[in-house]
Image: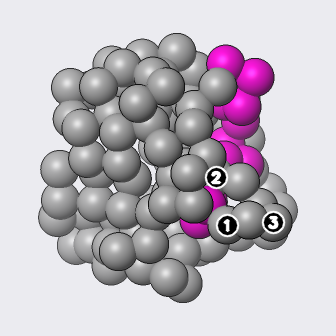
Amino acid sequence: MNGLGNLSGVRSMRYMFSSCAFTTIDFRGFDPSTLTDLFYTFSGCNKLTTILANASWALPTSGHAGSQCFYSCSTSLVGGNGTTWASNKTAYTYFRIDTAGTPGYVTVA
């Protein structure tokens, strides 16, 4: 899925992609600076393998809610540095670029 870069000012993605059938979601061009609610955003996305974003992708540093953002996804979801989805890594904090020092599920494209 692509075209999310056309959205602006989005505050909530609560359940937005829950149980999606996408394999790839492309957030390139999307500004995440206003996101505050990521509760169950990708829950049940058991076909999701890749989340793409620009190198500047970063959630705001405070003011979020988002438990279980990646609840019940699939081990097929892998970040750009090789972080593989795990049932104990489902918080919104994993909605970040995957690097050696900060594991996440986002791949820079």
**At 36% across and 20% down in the image, what residue appears?**
46
44 displayed left or right of 94: left
| Amino acid type, label 1 | Thr
Stretch in magenta: 87-98
- Identify the residue position indicated by label 1 in the image: 99
The tag earlier along the polypeptide, 2 or 1, is 1
Query: Depth check: 12 or 74 in front?
Result: 74
| Amino acid type, label 3 | Gly
7 displayed left or right of 61: left
Query: Which quarter shows the C terminus?
Result: bottom left
**At 57% across and 38% down in the image, what residue appears?**
84
20 displayed left or right of 106: left
- Identify the residue position indicated by label 3 in the image: 101
The reply to whether the magenta stretch includes residue 95 is yes
- Identify the residue position indicated by label 2 in the image: 104
Whether label 3 touches label 1, CB < 8 Å = yes
The reply to whether the magenta stretch includes residue 8 is no
Query: Depth check: 59 or 88 in front?
Result: 88
- Distance between the alpha carbons at the discs numbered 3 and 1: 5 Å
Whether label 2 touches label 1, CB < 8 Å = yes
| 94 to 49, vertically: above or below | below
Query: Depth check: 55 or 69 in front?
Result: 55
- Distance between the alpha carbons at the discs numbered 2 and 1: 7 Å
| 33 to 11, vertically: above or below | below
Mark 2 element type? loop
| Amino acid type, label 2 | Gly
Q: Tally the marks.
A: 3
**At 72% across and 31% down in the image, what residue appears?**
89
